[in-house]
Image: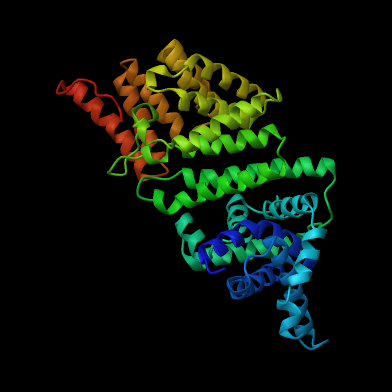
Amino acid sequence: MTDLTWISNAISTARPQAMGALLRYFRDLDAAEEAFQDACLRALKNWPKNGPPRDPAAWLIFVGRNSGIDAVRKRAKQAPMPEEDQISDLEDAEGDMAERLDGAHYRDDILRLLFICCHPDLPATQQIAVALRIVSGLTVKQIARAFLVGESAMEQRITRAKARIADAGVPFETPGAVERSERLAAVAAMIYLIFNEGYSTNGGEAPARAPLCEEAIRLARLLLRLFQQEPEIMGLTALLLLQHARAPARFDGNGEIVLLEDQDRSLWSRKMIDEGLALVDKALRHRKPGPYQVQAAIAALHARAATPEDTDWTEIDLLYGLLEQMQPSPVVTLNRAVAVSKVRGPEAALAMIEPLEDRLAGYFHFFGLKGGLLMQLGRGEEARVAFDRAIALANTAAEAAHIRMHIDRLIKESTGTSSIQKAR
């Protein structure tokens, strides 16, 4: 086997399974990672010569376990290193290993690995960084670039996270049914955080942060393979696909935000949309609605609309109402207000969000929406105050630039030099 691309893909696909099993053996993240890396080096040496193994994950686990044990022995000076052929001659051992590893065992190992990365003692940014390093295998340099920080700073962040995990004494036993359910929800939330970390960007940063969205989708697909009958995992995967499908149209050539209603829908990824829509339909057939499914159903309504005018805002309003019941949040209500403005007008939407101002006083999108609604109602001075507040709270240069366009429009209207232009 000489196709190094295939070998790289096989190793990447097998990584969560192999790392999960090696972590169970060695109960130490660093030891498991070192063992896996050594197994990968041996794969690069042996697979081109001997051909692909029947089960790459089993091969990597077997070789990594041997390598890790040898490393422990060497450090302890308890025994000499075994001969090379005892490790690399895997013709029979690999088959035996594959026979002993079943899907359920893999599932527990991977779930444990993902859950350890989203340990509740870790800040969200550290959870994401550790997951991308340990589970996904991204380099520190790649993660640092995505987070827009220096490589040494990211290295320290990951090191601190690993140390905290080690100090926490995380159990390595197979989780029971209740624990599994709790862990699954935590893992899904972590994957969603990874996606949002990549999705919340501006046009200039989008290429560097897009891999976070792509990696979140890969992890969601992996989780879905492990829990094929879980409608919420179907909903999560669908939501990420439908959101990321719009990525090519989210920014214009100057890196400025293009609102959903103004995006060139021919740029949307039809392949991702079709996959996402199929998952939404499958999840809803289970009749066990959850927050991810509802959000995916909202994204699906946008994806199915051939033009902005075709969007079913009444149904979106109803779905946000359901989401408010499942997951009460001022942000959910704020999003619902957008649909209400389309169905019942800006005055009804403004009345809905005004009580939220104290709780969303530091939230850019609240003041952006408030300013937009006030502008539609012809209350220009109040709109300007809201937009100024939004600029002060902007998370990215693209957000600030978008709000400035609204202010420019207000100035033109007040001086009579231009009619209202549609916001981009």
Left/right placement of residue 395 relative to residue 139 reads left
**Image quadrant assignment for residue 65:** bottom right
Q: Could you say which quadrant of the image residue 30 lies in?
A: bottom right
Q: Is residue 231 above or below residue 121?
A: above
179 to 229, vertically: above or below: below
Q: Pinpoint residue 101: horizontal percent, then vertical percent.
A: 79, 57
Residue placed most toward the observer, 60 or 406: 60
Q: Nearer the viewer, residue 389 or 313?
A: 313
Q: Where does residue 104 sit, x and y in percent of width and height?
A: 79, 49
The quadrant in which the N terminus is found is bottom right
Quadrant where the C terminus is found in the figure: top left
Residue 269's x, y, as percent? 43, 37
The mark total stands at: 0
Taking the spot 38% from the left edge, 22% from the top edge, the residue there is: 308
Is 259 rendered above or below residue 217?
A: above
Please state the horizontal and vertical placement of residue 399, each as a whole percent of the image: 37, 39
Residue drawn at (43%, 16%), measured in percent from left and top?
Answer: 341
Q: Is residue 67 above or below residue 331?
A: below
In-front residue for pair 164/19? 19
Whether residue 133 appears in this view of the structure is: no
Residue 204 appears left or right of 134: left
The reply to whether residue 309 is in sight is: yes
